[in-house]
Image (cartoon, coloured by chain):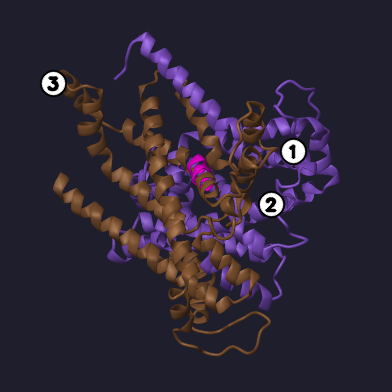
Amino acid sequence: MWLFMLPSVLVMALVLLYPFLSALYYSFTDYRLGGPPTSFIGLDNYTGLLTEGRFWADLLNTIGLVGISVALQLVIGMALALGLYGMTRGVRLVSILNFLPHVVTPVVGGIFLKWLFVGRWGLLDATLISFDIFPPDWLGDPFWARFTVVLADTWKFMPFLMLVLYAGLQSFDTALLEAASIDGANWWQRLRYVILPMMKPLILFVVAIRTMDAFRFFDLVYVLTNGGPGTATETITLYTYQIGFRMLEIGRASALGMITLVIVAIMVAGLIWFMTRRGREAF
Amino acid sequence: MRSSWQTQSVLLAVMGAFTLVNLVPILWGLIISLKQPGEAFSIPPTLIFEPTLIFHREVWVEKGFLSFLWNSLVIAAGTVFVSVPIGTLAAYGLARTRSRQASTLLFGLLAIRMLPQILLALPFFVMARYLALVDTYTMMILAMVAMNQPFTIWLMRSFFVDVPIELDEAAMIDGCNRWQAFWHVVLPAVRPGLAVTSLFSMLLAYNEFLFALILTGKNTKTLPVAIAEYGGEDIQYWSISAAAAIGIMLPAVIFTLLVQRHLIRGLTFGAVKG
């Protein structure tokens, strides 16, 4: 049986393990492309980053942007899933159309959104100006830029949550819902006390996936704001990109990547712990 | 929950309206691509205009987007040809093993998903520099295989698990060895899974931006990088980049239609079977 896994394991050792270990090694050096010879500097990269204001601001940005948009996606996605569940016809058409934002190449999606929000000529501004409403600077004002990025992330990932939650709803035993109706539970009570508790494992599963994705969040922001104005919408990934590929400080960028990995691992471990603890209570 | 005719129409209207709003960005992009630049940014925006396809022609033929399309396709196809066969073998092995090591390996694969992409992008960039493989298909395909392998294994494994193990056993009683049982009996049974997994791997490679930005160059530039360079900034180029954006989107639309029955399974690493 292990023979079947051999080719894949060998390839992964080459393309995953080896790069990972090199990055780990770089993170303890002052490696700089085209710079002076590399020397080992221990934890200097790490301590440098952890005592830097920009790192903490970016971390806060990443968590804030993603926290808010995941909450939005969850609420809208759940509402859409319930809508689909209640529909008797047209389910497939509606779900596929709503799914498109998720499969569209992220860069292209970002550009589409940019044409809505870009100052003055964007669809939004052009429409508002025709009604003599003076719009805010969607991409240039720190607050509104964050708002737009949250909206963009929501647009892209809401379909994912919609489909997964809808699949969860479909796998239900409808007898339970009918029993609740007979017992006189209204729509809200059925949602609150029957549907949501049953969906809990699935909800936690998608939130875990989205948390991991959060620290890969790159394409959309890169196109929409490129972290601007200033560093108002800069995420950890964008900052790593700046250090690694603009300043070519591979050592420092690797350290930042490692820190990110630790943060993600802690968050996911926390979610799993929460999931299993709650799981035992529920069953 | 199934309800009366009135509730149904209200529900349909609400869902329809939401869908429309949700698709505004894409529809607006489509409209820009069909308008003359002068009309594209009129205030108020107009919906009635004489559509033109000249920008679609211009971007693909004159601006060389066809060669970027070629690069994108070579990389996506290369990724599938490396990643799916070896991933399928490993998935079969894992689906038919009940040992502790196997489940450790499976969760290890899931943990790889936690790796921030950019952390792997750094050593890939360094490697590419040292081996003089910047701006080659090889490097980009290797990177995409790395990103794809855990996903391929998990998704294929979920299809293998659906095939009853009795099938393997029957084949082996009939005189097949392990390999023959896999090749002649089990593999044909998961053909739809193979197609779905290939399509998903292809889409992931086709949509990839970060690695393409770093590892490709003049000769291997993919569509996402090309369109990002064109940007949405300069209104002079709006019509052309909108035409490109719409064209780049089409394979994704076709993809969705092809795998519609398996979307949920693919999206969740095979964990949720829709």
> Residue placed at 63% from the left, 51% from the top?
A223
Mark 3, mark 2: which one is toward the viewer?
Answer: 2
> Residue placed at 50% from the left, 66% from the top?
A7
| Residue under label 1 | B243
* Of B70 and B172, the residue lying toward us: B70
Chain seen in brown: A
| Residue under label 2 | B228
Say what amino acid the circle numbered 3 marks.
Asp
Q: Position of residue B165 (x, y in %)?
A: 33, 48
Quarter of the picture containing the C terminus of chain A is top left
Specify the quadrant of the image occupied by residue A74.
top left
User: Spatial distance from mark 1 to mark 2, Cα to Cα?
Assistant: 13 Å
Stretch of the chain drawn in magenta: A149-156
Q: Is residue B185 left or right of residue B82?
A: left
Chain seen in purple: B
Q: Are marks 1 and 2 on the same chain?
A: yes
